[in-house]
Image (cartoon, rainbow, N blue to C red):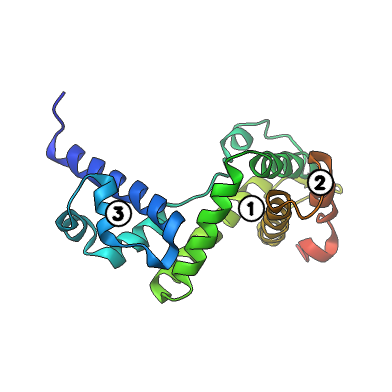
Amino acid sequence: MRLTRAQSKEANKRALLDAAREIVGREGSRARLEDITELAGLTTGAVYSLFGGKDGLMVAMVDDYTGPLDLRPIQTADPGLSLEEVVAEIARQFWRMADTPEAVGQLLFEVRVLDLVLNDPALLVKLNAAIRSTENALARLFTGRSSGGAAVTHDQAVRLARALKATLSGLGQSVILGVSGSSEQYFVNVAHALITPGVLGPA
């Protein structure tokens, strides 16, 4: 089946984004546009046509990256689940992400992206936006859930989401690096320990 012009354009964009992610994952800030286009099977002209150049491609790559956290199973779960039950499921997912052979490559890519963005203000803005987007998605899962006999407000949910993501990401990195022994239940226990007035703050 022959692709339409719009479909071909989207396919080329996807090929360049995937290639950029792979090359940046290996080379970080040393990633060369020529290597990216070669892997994608396209020309540098396609990059300028679709993204305006290498900088535009890098911005799009960071913007496109959402990480391996998949909230869909929780989003479709029973809306009557308590805050503690939802937080426990998120903790289990972070554990599963850290306890797989692919986790090392994922961590390496994220380190390379940091190498790339810390010297580029535009990329740093995009990365911060991606981080906030994940936190907001978590917060939406928490808002209105029952905890301690009261419904969690949006502001409380945002504060919990920020603390939870940072804590579980750090625990996941320690598992990947083999720094300390851990378990799925430990991730859940730590996540539950964050559900306190000190973290949630005022309603």
* Furthest residue toward top: 1
- Can residue 133 be seen here? The reply is no
Asked if 83 appears above or below 159 in the picture, the reply is above
At label 3, which amino acid type do we have? Ile
Q: Quadrant of residue 28?
A: bottom left
Relative depth, front residue between 23 and 55: 23
Asked if 168 appears above or below 14 in the picture, the reply is below
Q: Is residue 11 left or right of residue 185?
A: left
Q: Secondary structure at mark 1?
A: helix
Q: Is residue 11 left or right of residue 99?
A: left
The residue at 53%/57% (across/down) is 110
The numbered dot on residue 36 is 3
At label 2, which amino acid type do we have? Ser
Whichever of labels 2 and 1 marks the residue nearer the N terminus, that label is 1
Name the residue carrying label 1. Answer: 139
Whichever of labels 2 and 3 marks the residue nearer the N terminus, that label is 3
